[in-house]
């Protein structure tokens, strides 16, 4: 997403190192993984650090952000949520589009066509992304545990109470009581996805738990 603000700190880098070491024996040709968790949990930061460390080692990697796949651009989506809180959920996102991009990558396609959100302009465009030289594609976002075509799932186990300060620092949303209702609704959905994870990042980012080798 154009205009997104990442705040990468040492704990993101440390856990990214743990995860890339774990992936050493898993990465084959065209490997896909997801990084999921609640809003503000550090998904983007962790995903981009994993990609950076893999690229540093000569393993070409890139990130797809779920935020680009929302049906409506962010400011419009926010207003629609205000009108109807029931809208909050997976149906706000074109997960099937994201999954199809991952499937195309895994099937050996050299280019994919994907949406891109321009945050400040509140609009969505389409871009052609070259994935021909990539070995790893990382999908990050709240609901990416549900993607069918990923090989490996990471879940950051932080709830919206623990992510509140991070969200304030990223300053993407206007803070109002309504936002707590949104975050609570998201929490009820996303917390159920924890069981799908191969690796869980603990709330303090102090370590990881390997659930499936």
Image (cartoon, rainbow, N blue to C red):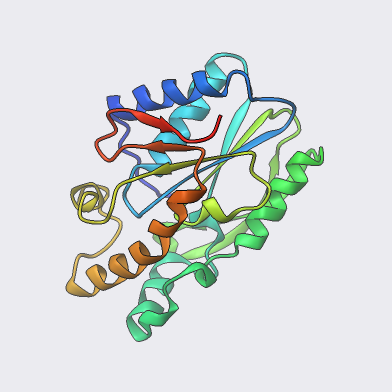
The residue at the far right in this view is 108
Query: Observer-nearest residue: 175 or 194?
Result: 194
Res 112 visible: yes
Query: Observer-nearest residue: 173 or 89?
Result: 89
Query: Observer-nearest residue: 54 or 25?
Result: 25
How far across and how far down the image is residue 199, in percent? 46, 36
- Give the residue at x 31% y 50%: 40
Res 2 visible: no
User: Is residue 169 depicted above or below 143 in this figure?
Assistant: above
Left or right: 104 in relation to 149: right
Please identify the quadrant where the C terminus is shown. top right
How far across and how far down the image is residue 116, in percent? 56, 54
- Give the residue at x 81% y 41%: 107
Report how many numbered discs are placed on residues in the image. Answer: 0
User: Is residue 68 depicted above or below 80 in this figure?
Assistant: above
Determine the image quadrant of residue 124: bottom right
User: Is residue 92 depicted above or below 47 in this figure?
Assistant: below
How far across and how far down the image is residue 43, in percent? 41, 43
The residue at the far bottom in this view is 83
Left or right: 177 in relation to 138: left
Left or right: 117 in relation to 11: right
Left or right: 16 in relation to 202: right
- Give the residue at x 45% y 70%: 89
- Give the residue at x 56% y 13%: 57
């Amino acid at each position: 997403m154009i205009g997104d603000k990442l705040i990468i700190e040492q704990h993101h880098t440390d856990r990214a190192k743990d995860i890339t070491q774990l992936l050493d024996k898993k990465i084959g040709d065209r490997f896909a993984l997801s990084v999921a968790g609640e809003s503000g949990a550090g998904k983007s930061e962790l995903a981009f650090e994993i990609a950076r460390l893999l690229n540093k080692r000569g393993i070409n990697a890139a990130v797809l952000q779920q935020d680009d796949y929302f049906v409506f651009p962010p400011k419009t989506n926010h207003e629609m949520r205000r009108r109807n809180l029931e809208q909050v959920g997976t149906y706000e996102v074109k997960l099937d589009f994201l999954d199809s991009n991952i499937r195309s990558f895994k099937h050996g396609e050299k280019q994919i066509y994907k949406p891109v959100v321009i945050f400040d302009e509140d609009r969505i465009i389409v871009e052609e992304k070259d994935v021909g030289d990539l070995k790893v594609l990382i999908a990050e976002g709240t609901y990416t545990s549900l993607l069918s075509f990923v090989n490996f799932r990471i879940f950051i186990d932080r709830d919206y109470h623990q992510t509140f300060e991070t969200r304030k620092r990223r300053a993407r949303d206007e803070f109002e009581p309504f936002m707590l209702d949104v975050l609570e609704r998201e929490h009820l959905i996303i917390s159920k996805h924890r069981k799908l994870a191969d690796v869980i990042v603990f709330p303090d980012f102090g370590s990881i738990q390997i659930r499936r080798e």
